[in-house]
Amino acid sequence: MRVLYILSLRISTVGLLATVAAGLCTAGVTVSESTINFKTWSEGLPDINPWFELYPSDNFAMYPYTLRNNFLSDTSIVTWRQLVLENEYLYCRVFAAAASLFDSLSPNANALVRAAGLEVAVLRHEGNAAAAASLHSQSRAASPTDLFLRYEGTLLNIPDSTILSDLGAEPERVLNLVDDYLRLGFYSDALGLLGQTYPDVPANRREPGSVTPQNNALIAYYRGYCRQLAGSSPAADFAAASGMTLPYLFPNRSSSFAVLSAATQWNGSDAAAHSLLGLLYMGRRQVGDAVAEWQRAW
């Protein structure tokens, strides 16, 4: 008896095939592509506000995007593109609508710009440079200052002489983009940002007390974490991060749990990683976990 899995994911087809195929028994696996017609419910607009719990009682998984759960009563027959992977044990059907999943998002201007930037990245990874460049041009016209779109432009060979200084003025801006690339599974793009040497900028263009991203411990920890996800050793980056000073560093991202936990698992005596992880727990009012991390740091 075979098990049927039906997936609909917002990741690139190539990455999806590699991920799913890796989980299958390698003997006798076949891959095919076709279309299928079936009844599909239409969607209303999602809530434009992502769902966050103000005071989570445990490691609450924050979902950074609006939930698409506003399904309407009307239906129609829709043609879906499908990828099928199967062997004698498993039949896996994947509806590969990677880029088009962003098309039905809220017409709120900020939501559309965010969605457009992610779609540009997906199109670029799918090898559709022309469509990516076209959407990028339309989106930049609507939001010329958006940092994600500007950086995506450089990956499409569109010059931007000030993007590195604008990102480098605040390391959190870099991590904003890195978080999006991590959610998409685009580790090489994240590493490109994390490995840059950013120009120093005048003090009146920086957050008080901030340093350039290449001198920021969190940036270095994220860089090591991305290398680890990409299959390389994080040792050099984690070691560099542990030797940096930590002034004005207050980690607050959900992704930082995985990053700093990976660093402490790599080196249990990394006081900097334990200290930052303690701050992260304290920010979520998980006092016991915070104290435990600080005790490990000292």
Image (cartoon, rainbow, N blue to C red):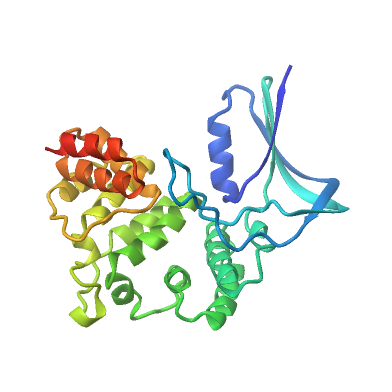
Residue lying at 37% horizontally and 53% vertically, measured from the top left:
253
Taking the image as shown, residue 160 lies to the left or right of residue 260, namely right
Image vertical order of residue 30 relative to residue 102, above or below: above
Residue lying at 56% horizontally and 81% vertically, measured from the top left:
142
Question: In front here: 86 or 48?
Answer: 48
Residue 191 is situated, as x and y percent measured from the top left of the image, at: 34, 55
Taking the image as shown, residue 292 lies to the left or right of residue 134, namely left
Q: How many marks do you count on the picture?
A: 0
Residue 280 is situated, as x and y percent measured from the top left of the image, at: 30, 47
Work out whether residue 138 can be spotted.
Answer: yes
Taking the image as shown, residue 286 lies to the left or right of residue 28, namely left
Q: Residue furthest top?
A: 1
Image vertical order of residue 193 relative to residue 23, above or below: below
Residue lying at 31% horizontally and 73% vertically, measured from the top left:
164
Image vertical order of residue 83 relative to residue 43, above or below: above
Image vertical order of residue 140 relative to residue 118, above or below: below
Question: In front here: 185 or 294?
Answer: 294
Work out whether residue 262 can be spotted.
Answer: no
Residue lying at 22% horizontally and 43% vertically, measured from the top left:
273
Residue 180 is situated, as x and y percent measured from the top left of the image, at: 46, 57
Question: In front here: 241 or 119?
Answer: 241
Can you say which quadrant of the picture contains the N terminus? top right
Q: Quadrant of residue 292?
A: top left
Can you say which quadrant of the picture contains the C terminus? top left
Residue 149 is situated, as x and y percent measured from the top left of the image, at: 48, 71
